[in-house]
């Protein structure tokens, strides 16, 4: 039976009109206020769209204006393509064309990128939020209900091979993700969620959605800043925060008080296991770290480890949340405890598939189980350990980097005949990409950097380019990226 | 898309094996323990059932054994028919035949009723929980997953006319009901829910289900007892309780301490509005009363009023919970604020229909909206007020009584030529039924009582039988039950 709920923001504004919905610097808005702004924003967007438009992209950082646009599009039932503001114009162009986006809305800080896009894609209208605000407001009929099977958001992820894929996140996916989280960490009257991760990633967007469903404020931060976050966590204003290891590192190194405010009850840590020394510092300082595992396709966390288990189950991502399942498969069979294999997940929080990718979808789903491509195992008690993110995924400061994408760029350079990329541990970012190249003559590292910078978001540009005689390949000539790091030692 | 989740009890036992699941008198069980007992119980039940059985009825009061059987049947994916232990054998027989029940499980306190049933229904096997415990335990494959469209429970309700109808409550209905509640009242680590209402009613069953979904203990009480409940609420052991007005009355009149433990944070009050004097006493004593509106068809509460609004919005049932909608209809149009009309509800917590009642179902659902038959209005702020329960429903001490059912019995008496029943306010029970009869010669009240007692659950037997010359009927000859109470004054 199709599940239908009321329009979430309208419902929340009806149930809790005077509760705080959003805090940004020293401004704040109630749910009643943001619902009004969202409707007004929707009324402005409508004037720019062809009839029956179904998709709009946003190129925005963490600002209240981005929130108005996101909520406004939801009022219209329009699918929102979330663009990563760190990507280059050519990376973005691919996503915009692939998603058949009919309008791009950007914020003033991304003006240069928007200009490049508007030159490259002359037939997609593009407007800044500032200009949008000046537009006339049309009377509109907002969606009174959300059908949970409808797509709410699209976010692109890359993979081992091929182009990035648009992950379809339905209203139902977001709902069940929010429900799984609340059943894990509870819901208190004083709760508020600090959002210092990008809202164009699922980690950030899911905070906005939980805020509406739970009726709690989001404290939105434009750009992560250790000192600012520390002062928020010490103020008692924040009870929950989502972060990646690199952020926690910076927070702790800049922390002045010995501990945060006792109201701060949950630090959700994603993007790979938190290293033991860091966990021990957190324990000392009474910081309640919940380690999580999740991805764009699971609409944020799917497994979480409670603080009381964090040292006993070091490196584990805990157990799958209440609505979800996770299993380890080895050659079509479920693995035994401690046996390594591929991670499969199932649950109503999991994407219904990638946009326009029938073949990939057919290969990714088996009997309702989604093949993550990640490797891991469960221990005897069922706690999940992630060994390797899929396709040697590199997570750098919370951003996902796919080696294949960088290798493709390196190989497109005239002098490079073979290329491999892997993640190398880094104190600040967790991991950073290193490029290994084979070339007929000595290469100029600086020249390759420049070549990459033109074509790749800066966080994807290899931190080093190392020339080698040959790359490690297996019998089937498949690149063994995990062996690449050993080449650093051989380097002279 | 069909929604599938893991088996809830199995999942909860995996996530929170050592948390307390159930407390009864001075015994308690963890989730791991009750999952084991449920599986064992399922393994015993299986031996008594024909292959592919789909329905088992339970005739049990609030005991741990009833919980094992309910959870055990869920492990098998068998639909559970919840029998009201206060009904007579003939009332129960109708439900058992209508639901095509294949096995009845009863508890020792209901032995007499069970014996009557087994005589009347020789082809439905019947077993006591005590005998069930002695049965061999078969190895079974439990349900690894719940499909949310599957029926979990069936509870019978009566209506204006005709026989009682079996309300189909799916796993999804229960899930969304539990979710709507948690988004309203939150979820704290120390939460526990006192169940002093019958688990064969949705008010009680929904507490068991929330316990599993939330991972919190149920404190189960065999029979409501004001003193016992008061001591539990004063101990700090209970944070949430479901009650009806009659219970609250008794609790307050027997309360020794000036207030309950501060951990007690929510008294959900169902079964009609709580009278103002009672609310004022609750306020004085810091008892946080949440007035609710709900019914078997909505799988427990669908609207709730927060304590901070309870006196400002006296008599209101608040607003519909997050996943649900409620509207007032007058002649096919949505009513204006303050305008009275029929209450319609919509949401994933609402039954998919009545068992074997295609015609009633077709009449009850319009575009996904369920017609409750109840009358009410919304005020300017959208708060809902219930004026009259459907079909002159009488709520007496939390039990629903349908006048039509009693009138049918009265009319079957040889000397009665016309009959009408209505609810008369009563200090202890809220309302009690009074019978008004027309007869050719003076009737003997005692004899009519005895006649009713044989055919009706005792709470349905009219407290008084009043003989009148004629009943108030409108032009269409429809009985106007609301005018019946005026006949008391005319009585000599």
Image: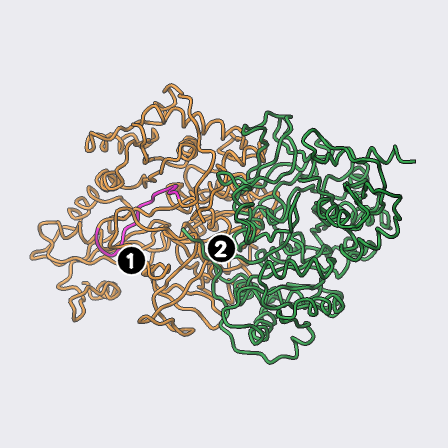
Chain colours: A green, B orange
Left or right for A410, reference B278: right
Residue at the far right in the pictured view: A492
Q: Which residue is mark 2?
A: A148
Residue in the image at 81% along x and 57% along y: A228
Badge 1 crowding class, 10 Å Cα cut-off, few under 14, some 14 to 19, many 20 or more, is: many
Residue B423's label in the rendered image is 1
Residue A278 placement: quadrant: top right
Tell me the quadrant of the picture where the C terminus of chain B can be found: bottom left
Q: Is residue B446 magenta?
A: no
The subunit letter for the residue under badge 1 reads B
Q: Is residue B178 above or below residue B476?
A: above
Horizontal and vertical percent position of residue B148:
43, 44
Can you say whether B428 is above or below A81 in the image? above
| Residues at marks 2 and 1 on the same chain | no
Residue A150 visible in image: yes
- Left or right: B85 as drawn, with respect to A82: left
Can you tell which of label 2 and label 1 is closer to the viewer?
2
* x 51%, y 50%: residue: B179
Q: Is residue A362 left or right of residue B149?
A: right
């Amino acid at each position: 039976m199709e599940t239908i709920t009321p329009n979430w923001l309208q419902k929340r504004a009806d149930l809790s009109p005077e509760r705080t919905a959003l805090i940004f610097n020293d401004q704040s808005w109630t749910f009643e206020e943001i619902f009004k702004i969202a409707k007004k924003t929707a009324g402005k967007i409508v004037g720019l769209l062809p009839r029956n438009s179904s998709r709009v992209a946003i190129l925005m950082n963490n600002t209240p204006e981005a929130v108005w646009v996101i909520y406004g599009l939801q009022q219209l039932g329009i699918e929102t393509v979330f663009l990563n503001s760190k990507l280059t114009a050519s990376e973005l162009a691919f996503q915009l064309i692939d998603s058949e986006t009919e309008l791009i809305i950007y914020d003033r800080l991304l003006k240069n990128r928007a200009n490049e896009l508007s030159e490259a894609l002359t037939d997609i209208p593009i407007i800044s939020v500032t200009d949008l605000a000046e537009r006339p407001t049309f009377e509109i009929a907002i969606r009174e209900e959300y059908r949970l099977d409808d797509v709410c958001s699209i976010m692109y992820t890359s993979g081992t091979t091929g182009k990035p894929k648009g992950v379809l996140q339905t209203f139902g996916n977001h709902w069940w993700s929010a429900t799984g989280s609340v059943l894990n960490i509870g819901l208190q009257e004083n709760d508020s969620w600090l959002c210092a991760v990008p809202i164009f990633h699922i980690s950030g967007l899911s905070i906005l959605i939980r805020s509406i469903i739970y009726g709690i404020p989001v404290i939105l931060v434009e750009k992560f800043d250790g000192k600012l976050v520390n002062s928020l966590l010490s103020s008692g204003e924040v009870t929950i925060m989502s972060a990646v290891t690199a952020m926690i590192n910076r927070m702790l190194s800049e922390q002045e008080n010995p501990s945060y405010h006792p109201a701060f009850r949950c630090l959700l840590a994603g993007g790979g296991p938190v290293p033991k020394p860091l966990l021990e510092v957190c324990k000392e300082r009474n910081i309640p770290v919940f380690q999580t595992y999740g991805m764009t396709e699971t609409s944020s966390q799917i497994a979480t480890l409670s603080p009381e288990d964090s040292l006993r189950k070091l490196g584990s991502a805990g157990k799958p949340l209440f609505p979800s399942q996770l299993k380890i498969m080895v050659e079509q069979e479920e693995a035994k405890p401690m046996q390594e294999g591929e991670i499969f997940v199932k649950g109503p929080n999991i994407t219904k598939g990638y946009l326009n990718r029938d073949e990939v979808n057919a290969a990714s789903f088996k009997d309702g189980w989604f093949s993550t491509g990640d490797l891991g195992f469960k221990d005897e008690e069922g706690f999940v350990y992630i060994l390797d993110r899929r396709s040697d995924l590199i997570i750098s400061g919370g951003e996902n980097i796919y080696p294949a994408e960088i290798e493709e760029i390196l190989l497109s350079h005239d002098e490079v005949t073979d290329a491999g990329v892997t993640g190398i541990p880094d104190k600040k970012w967790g991991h950073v990409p290193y490029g290994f190249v084979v070339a007929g003559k000595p290469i100029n590292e600086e020249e390759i950097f420049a070549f990459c910078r033109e074509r790749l978001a800066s966080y994807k540009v290899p931190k080093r380019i190392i020339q080698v005689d040959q790359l490690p390949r297996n019998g089937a000539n498949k690149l063994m990226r995990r062996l690449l790091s050993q080449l650093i030692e051989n380097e002279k």
